[in-house]
Amino acid sequence: MATATPAPLSQTPTAPLPAEAVDALSRLAPHFPLVEAVAVYETASVHVVQLAALAESGRLSDLDADSLAHAEDLMAGALATIAQAGRLDLIGGA
């Protein structure tokens, strides 16, 4: 017995959002970059702590050193976004 192949997601019909949802989304959308920046900052800071511990122990490989530099770059970019929004309080800053 043959099974039906589902339509690709791009071709799956969707219902329009209710007006209330559209309004809520339009109020929240400007905050998405800030939310993303906080998540990136927090995740990268955990990686920096972990990789810095490796560096202190003398077991930091070249790949780990590249990862540390990348995590620090991510933190700096996220910090700039958060600071520009005036919301350093979200990451424990003043």
Image (cartoon, rainbow, N blue to C red):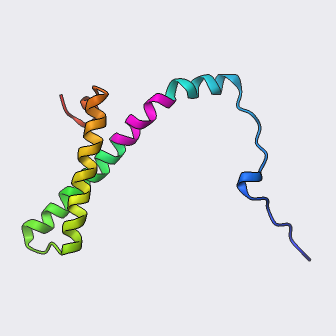
What residue is rendered at 25% in x and 29% in y?
A: 89
Q: Is residue 1 above or below residue 16?
A: below
Q: Quadrant of residue 17?
A: top right
The answer to whether residue 71 is left or right of residue 6 is left
| 93 or 61, nearer to the observer | 61
Image coords of residue 4 (percent x, y): 86, 67
The residue at the far right in this view is 1
Quarter occupied by the N terminus: bottom right
| 92 or 75, nearer to the observer | 75
Q: Is residue 65 above or below residue 80?
A: below
Task: Specify the segment rendered in magenta.
Answer: 29-37
| 61 or 57, nearer to the observer | 61
Q: Quadrant of residue 77?
A: top left
The answer to whether residue 40 is left or right of residue 57 is right
Image coords of residue 32 (percent x, y): 45, 35
Q: Is residue 23 magenta?
A: no
What residue is rendered at 31% in x and 36% in y?
A: 81
Q: Is residue 63 above or below residue 25?
A: below
The answer to whether residue 58 is left or right of residue 32 is left
> Principal SS element in the magenta part?
helix
Image coords of residue 93 (percent x, y): 19, 33
**Total number of numbered labels?**
0
What residue is rendered at 58% in x and 25% in y?
A: 24
The answer to whether residue 4 is left or right of residue 91 is right
Image coords of residue 6 (percent x, y): 79, 62
What residue is rendered at 7% in x and 66% in y?
A: 56
Q: Is residue 55 above or below residue 84?
A: below
Quarter occupied by the C terminus: top left
